[in-house]
Image: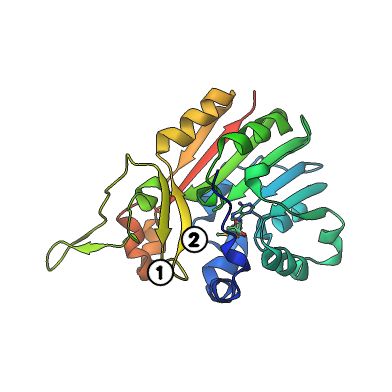
Amino acid sequence: MAAAQNIYDDDVFFNKYLGYPRSTDDISGMHEWDSYAQFFPKSMKGFKVVDLGCGTARFSRYAVNNGAEYVLALDISKNMINKAKSLTNENESKHIEYKLEDLTNLTLEKKTFNLVFSCFTFHYLSDIDRPFKQIYDSLVSGGSFIFMVEHPIYTASIKQPSFIKVDQDNIAWPVANYQNEGQRITNWVTEGVLKYHRKIETYINLCIKLGFQINGISEWGPTKQQLIDLPHLINEDQRPEILTISCIKP
Ligand SMILES: C[S@@+](CC[C@H](N)C(=O)[O-])C[C@H]1O[C@@H](n2cnc3c(N)ncnc32)[C@H](O)[C@@H]1O
């Protein structure tokens, strides 16, 4: 198995990443928030939660502020964990345990958690079979597993993906190499960032094989109102950038 790159501990990458409002906005301020939040349990009161690849821990803090009793927030990057701690207030810190961990070696306590959440992290992992099995085993019956990844239509391209011009009025998103899963070297934020392309069927079939019931999938695109308020989102109307899958452990 390939060693994790841990690009967020590269200071050039990290500082540029933090410069993007989209990376640091409050989680409920993200354009795509509604497409995630529709899957959240109505209340997180008393919940034990895991936030995998927590980054600045915006979801961990959200969970605590919505009643979660304990959040285990894991990330491979010291930079990210330090930043997350600096953003965590005194009350939140009573409920969040931060740990440095490479998710490819993930080990979680069994039948313990009500919700496992992960936003924009699994496409950095060379293997998801082990973490997904650990996640399934760690949930109590009825517990939820909700995750977002860069959409396979977005990650397929061998080269850094980008729109192409079709004619004077039209652009298109090229989908090539979709069937060829595996490592992609992208120039996102800085050059040489390693990600892993997987097909939609790979994510879904793995969840089903483990015993999850899939209760929703979302491929966020801007609403009509968002296109009026935020016209720069127009390209997001052309293809999905984010795949969200929501599962329940029966
Ligand atoms: C795009 S950021 C998302 C952060 C956060 N989930 C959010 O939505 O704001 C991806 C995060 O995944 C973490 N990550 C990448 N590979 C990892 C690995 N092998 N183990 C643990 N965390 C990893 C990175 O350090 C980074 O914090």
Q: Position of residue 146 (x, y in %)?
A: 59, 41
The single residue placed furthest to the left in the displayed view is 167
Residue 6 placement: quadrant: bottom right
| Residue 6 visible, this angle | yes
Disc 1 secondary structure class: loop
Q: Is residue 244 above or below residue 91?
A: above
Disc 1 residue crowd, few under 14, some 14–19, many 20+, Cα 10 Å:
few
Disc 2 residue crowd, few under 14, some 14–19, many 20+, Cα 10 Å:
some
Q: Which residue is label 1 attached to?
A: 230
Question: Would you say the residues marked 2 and 1 are in contact, meaning their CB atoms lie under 8 Å apart?
Answer: yes
Q: Is residue 109 above or below residue 83?
A: above
Q: Residue at x 81, y 53 (%)?
A: 97
Q: Residue at x 60, y 65 (%)?
A: 8
| Residue 25 visible, this angle | no
Q: Specify whether 151 is left or right of 132.
A: left
Decide which of 163, 190 is in the foreground and name it: 190
* Of the image marks 2 and 1, the number of the one nearer the N terminus: 2
* Ligand 1 sits in quadrant: bottom right
Looking at the rendered structure, the kind of residue marked 1 is Leu
User: Quadrant of the image for the N terminus?
Assistant: top right
Q: Residue at x 54, y 30 (%)?
A: 207
Q: Position of residue 119 (x, y in %)?
A: 58, 51
Q: Which residue is label 2 attached to?
A: 31
Residue 10 placement: quadrant: bottom right
Mark 1 CB lies closer than 8 A to ligand 1: no
Q: Specify whether 225 is left or right of 4.
A: left
Disc 2 secondary structure class: loop
Q: Position of residue 18 (x, y in %)?
A: 58, 73
Q: Marks 2 and 1, how far apart in space?
A: 10 Å
Looking at the rendered structure, the kind of residue marked 2 is His
